[in-house]
Image (cartoon, rainbow, N blue to C red):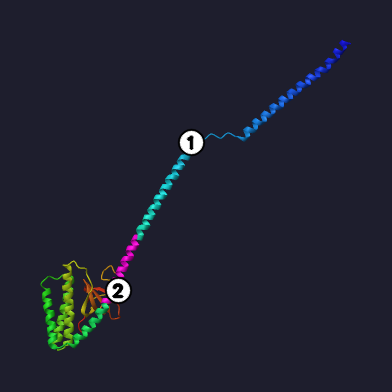
Amino acid sequence: MKGFSIQMDKPYRLPQVRAGQMLCWIALVLLGLNMMGCSLLLKSQSPELPAVSPESNMKEQQEIERMQKLLVEKEAEKEAQQQEIERLQKILVEKEAQIRVQQARQQDQAKTLQETSSQAVHAQVKLRRLATRPAAASTIAEAEVAMENLKSSPFTESEQVVQSQAQRLLSAAAASYAEDNHVAAMEYAAYARGLIDMIKNNRAFKTSDSRRVTTPFEVPIPLRAATNSNLRQNPALSAAVLSVAKKDSLMTAEAYQGDWLRIQTADGQSGWVLNTLVEAQVGK
């Protein structure tokens, strides 16, 4: 019976042992699969960064340097523009100051000429009122003496033009005196004296350090245009041309500055002309 029981127990133990081994193998396989899954998950979550090549680093450095250089150039350009703006602003301020000074000077000259014109009218009225034969003779004689004094020094080309016109007026004064036209004689002599004084004063100015100013004639001098003449805003060739006085058009010289005459035309325009472009008006 014992032998039979032994034979009967063996078939039952073998399957139990194999089942336990199978469970161990299954546990090991599951553990391995779990570890493989974790490894794959870690690899997917933390990918490796690609390696940066030396050429890429060099290009990036060159781009940075280029941008820095461009920035420096822009800053320099901005600074240069700012300096140019400041320079132009300074010029503008200076020009505005010059314009204000010039406007003030022109206003002063206009005021002076207006006063001079009024004084000249009074002087002419007085001249005519005092026009007697002795007064006319005295006025002509004084002008002739002043002319002789001018001849002690050689005339410049511009002075020669003015001197010839003064001489022409003196001749007209003498002719009027001979005709007992004492008013005309004194007027012509006064006109001649004005031109003589112009030469005298211009000579004195050239030998001094004083600033050239506008000098009024004591008596306005009747003139006519010797040729078509530009009437300028100021006594300078660079001054703006206001109008053109046609040849033989009548005008009156009220003042002078150097070789320039401040004149007023018959139609009321005022401006400056060179003394070489006009001539004394003698007769009617």
x, y percent for residue 162: 18, 75
The residue to which callout 1 is attached is 55
* For residue 182, above or below residue 226: below
Left or right for 149, reference 241? left
Q: Main secondary structure of the magenta part?
A: helix
Q: Which residue extends farthest right?
A: 1
Rendering quarter of residue 140: bottom left
Residue numbers of the magenta segment: 90-112
The mark nearer the N terminus, 1 or 2, is 1
Which label sits in the foreground, 1 or 2?
2
Left or right side of 142 for 20? right
Residue lying at 86% horizontally and 15% vertically, measured from the top left: 8
Residue drawn 69% across and 28% down? 33
Quarter of the rendering occupied by the N terminus:
top right
Q: Could you tell me residue 196's position as x and y percent?
A: 16, 76
Q: Which residue is mark 2?
A: 107
Residue drawn at x 45%, y 40% is 62
* Residue 92, position as x, y percentages in the image: 35, 62
The image quadrant that residue 118 belongs to is: bottom left
Q: Is residue 144 visible?
A: yes
